[in-house]
Image: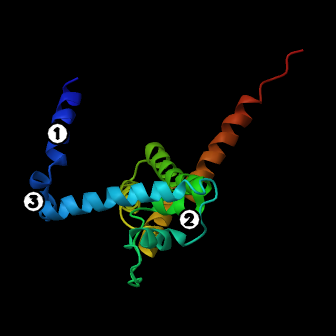
Amino acid sequence: MITMAIWLSAIPALASPQLIGPLVGRSGGELTFTAAFRTETWRTVLRLWAHSPVLGAGPGQSSVLLTAAHAAPGALPTGALVSAQGVWAAALLDGGLIALGLWLILLGGGIIIGVRALWRYPTGLRWATVAAGGAAVIDVMNTGDRLFPLDWLILALMLAAAAPSYASARDRSDSHHRSYGESNQRPLQG
């Protein structure tokens, strides 16, 4: 109950650009502009996505569609494409619900695998890679409309660290066979 009260009182403070601006090194005006731009971009994404919700508009079309939607009527193209502001928005526009589901499986499944391995066999390396993988996923959700090579590398390292080592897997297998063999060697009663 106390935690909920703290969170509810913190939300207005975090929503105020003047209070959070110094914490992130940006002015209140910049934060207000960024929030308004992202909100309007998401409204546009949802409006454009409604035309083809299951399959989307096709690969790479999110930036093209958003640029055309943000351009003033009759204006010449500037050559700079507008970002979808996150892989989720780009997935919805490019590939619809199917692409969004695949991204959720890939990124969510990767984090689940990393956390599961960390839960079973906590090591410093697994802690570091799961934390980096989680940060990469959060970054991808909020910034660009694609994963960059560094993001892929971090996710690959997290999955590699989540894989059990060959020696520990062999030891578990040997101990399983020994315990199984011993339990089945009871004398026959007859």
From where the camera sits, is residue 132 visible?
Answer: no
Is the image coloured rainbow, by chain, by secondary structure, or in one colour?
Answer: rainbow
Q: Percent from the top left, x then y, of residue 170?
A: 62, 53
Q: Which amino acid does label 3 sit on?
A: Pro
Judge the density around disc 2: few (<14), some (14-19), many (≥20) Cα neighbours within 10 Å. Answer: many
Q: Gap between marks 2 and 3, in whole Å?
A: 36 Å
Identify whether 29 is placed above or below 186: below
Identify whether 83 is placed above or below 164: below
Q: Which amino acid does label 1 sit on?
A: Ala
Q: Percent from the top left, x then y, of residue 34?
A: 25, 62
Q: Are marks 2 and 3 in contact (CB under 8 Å)?
A: no
Residue 46 appears left or right of 96: left
Observer-nearest of 87 and 79: 79
Q: Gap between marks 2 and 1, in whole Å?
A: 36 Å
Q: Quadrant of residue 55?
A: bottom right
Residue under the point 38% across and 61% down:
41
**Mark 2 — residue?**
94
Q: What element carries label 1?
A: helix
Residue 155 appears left or right of 183: left
Give the label on residue 114, or none: none
Q: Quadrant of residue 125?
A: bottom left
Give the label on residue 10, or none: 1
Q: Gap between marks 3 and 1, in whole Å?
A: 16 Å
Say which label, 2 or 1, has the lower sequence index. Answer: 1
Observer-nearest of 16 and 72: 72
